[in-house]
Amino acid sequence: MTAMADTSSSSTKAKKKRKKGFEPRIVSFCCNWCSYAGADLAGTSRMQMPPNVRIIRVNCTGRIDPSFVLDALAQGADGVLISGCHPGDCHYTSGNLKMRGRFVLLESLVEQAGFDPRRVHLQWASAAEGDVFRDGVTAMVERIKELGPNPAREED
Ligand code: FES
């Protein structure tokens, strides 16, 4: 994988792009049983949410291979939000706990690939927590706006 780093030269470009009204592209991997339903609830409840997120449904956060996240960043996603069941509520018993354990490694891999690890985030949101999902997306969009565009897609 050849990612351009979140470096100072790219951050200068990022600042220019931010001034032009940068809108982050966020990929969110959501587990089917809790967070996807929570995201759906946010939509059906007509909660105001930034339109910057594209959801990829997976059966469980335990299914998310770190390469999924690295591929998303390499292909130009500005940020990746992983959202799953609360600890103790995973429909596959411990998939979310495995994801949580893997997340530290994932942050390290993201950094080694040249991306700021703040571009990835892990949260828990149940099927009844549309507001939690919405707040997670909103916070992610704000954080990525501060970081600027993914340097791998600055030629857009
Ligand atoms: S089923 Fe939701 S995190 Fe495992």
Image: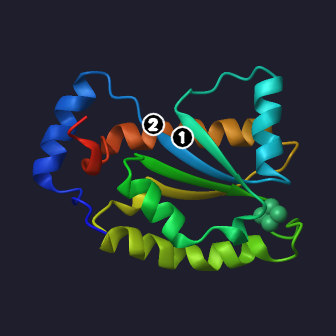
* Mark 1 residue CB less than 8 A from any atom of ligand 1: no
The residue at 49%/73% (across/down) is: 106
The quarter of the rendered structure image containing the C terminus is top left
Residue at numbered disc 2: 142
Residue at numbered disc 1: 139
Q: Quadrant of residue 130?
A: top right
The residue at 45%/38% (across/down) is: 25
Q: What is the count of numbered marks?
A: 2
* Classed neighbour count for the residue bearing mark 1: other residues with Cα under 10 Å, few (<14), some (14–19), many (≥20): few
The quarter of the rendered structure image containing the N terminus is bottom left
Residue lying farthest to the left in this orientation: 9
- Does residue 107 appear in the picture of this structure? yes
**Residue 143 position within the rendered picture, expressed as x and y whole percent measured from the top left:** 43, 43
The residue at 82%/23% (across/down) is: 45
**Residue 14 position within the rendered picture, expressed as x and y whole percent measured from the top left:** 21, 39
Closer to the camera in the image, 110 or 19: 110
Give the colouring mode of the picture: rainbow
* Classed neighbour count for the residue bearing mark 2: other residues with Cα under 10 Å, few (<14), some (14–19), many (≥20): some
Q: Report, in whole angstroms, how far the alpha carbon at label 1 lies from the one at label 2.
A: 5 Å
Q: Are marks 1 and 2 in contact (CB under 8 Å)?
A: yes
Q: Is residue 130 above or below residue 105?
A: above
Quadrant of the image where one finds ligand 1: bottom right
Q: Is residue 35 above or below residue 50?
A: below
The residue at 22%/60% (across/down) is: 5
* Amino acid type at mark 1: Ala
The numbered mark at residue 45 is: none
* Amino acid type at mark 2: Glu
**Residue 57 position within the rendered picture, expressed as x and y whole percent measured from the top left:** 71, 51
- Does residue 86 appear in the picture of this structure? no
Element assignment for label 1: helix
Element assignment for label 2: helix
**Residue 115 position within the rendered picture, expressed as x and y whole percent measured from the top left:** 32, 61
